[in-house]
Image (spheres, helix red, strand yellow):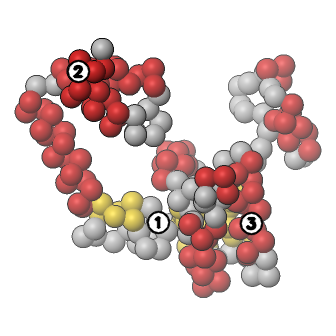
Amino acid sequence: MNSDLPSLTKFLKTLQQVPYLASKNLYRVAAHFLHMDTARAEMFCQILLETKQRITKCTICFAWQEKDQPCFLCSSPKRNRDIICVVESWQELVTIEKTGGYDGLYHVLGGVICPLDGIGPEQLTIEHLVTRVAAGANEVILATNQTPEGEATAAYIASKLKGLPVTISCLARGVPVGSSLEFMDRLTVYKALSERRPF
């Protein structure tokens, strides 16, 4: 069938390059775009191109910012400049912001150390983080994901910050609110027990 629809095949191959787009949704997404009228499709493409032209990464925290404006996070007078929360990507930053419970600054690493994928510390913004912390910060929160790569990256950052007058903390680990112990994996229960706190 694919050989009979070369234009559609090309479109599907392009969609496959979008990370996080599950293959089971590929045909649904393709159908969505193909059902769009031409005006809406053109508007969608125009907005995407305009966004790429107008958005860039902050040279301090590496979160997205408008090119013609200062970073809304780094320039905000309401944010606590003594704390830097280190996240893997912009998505985690957004998740933390949605809680409304954090008012410090951020640092986006741009990924995690993963030698199998050819990603080492030099491909991330770790050196920029060390420079920021050395210039003045009281606490660094390592909010990397609890994956082997995330843990290794956090450990590497902690080693790079060793010797600087800064408190290094990480997100609490353990049993999620509203969950049942019988459905937890062993590592989660172990972390919850070993990192327990006073009631």
Closer to the camera, 142 or 75? 142
How far apart are the two marked residues, 1 and 2, measured between alpha carbons? 41 Å
Q: Quadrant of residue 112?
A: bottom right
Residue 161 vertical position relative to residue 27 in the rendered view, above or below: below
Residue at figure coordinates x 27%, y 56% from the top left: 52
Residue 41: percent from left, percent from top: 15, 34
Q: Is residue 59 left or right of residue 140?
A: left
Q: Secondary structure at mark 3?
A: helix
As drawn, the label of residue 5 is 2
Amino acid tagged 2: Leu
Q: Earlier in the sequence, mark 1 or mark 2?
A: 2
Residue 62 vs 138, above or below: the answer is above
Residue type marked 3:
Tyr
Is residue 143 in view? Answer: no
Which numbered disc, 2 or 3, marks the residue that appears first in the sequence?
Answer: 2
Q: Residue furthest top?
A: 1
Secondary structure, mark 1, is loop
Disc 2 + disc 3, Cβ < 8 Å: no
**Residue at disc 2, secondary structure:** loop
**Residue at the bottom extreme?**
135
Name the side, left or right, on which 179 lies relative to 80: right
User: What is the CA distance from the residue labelled 1 to the residue labelled 3?
Assistant: 19 Å
Q: Position of residue 128 (x, y in %)?
A: 56, 76
Q: Position of residue 134 (x, y in %)?
A: 65, 83
- Out of 13 and 85, give the one closest to the viewer: 13
Where is mark 3, residue-wise?
A: 156
Locate the C terminus by quadrant. Answer: top right
| Residue sitting at x 74%, y 24% | 179
Apparent side of residue 8 relative to residue 184 in the rendered image (left or right): left
Q: Nearer the viewer, mark 1 or mark 2?
A: 2
Of badges 1 and 3, nearer the viewer stands 3
Q: Which residue is the site of mark 1?
A: 62
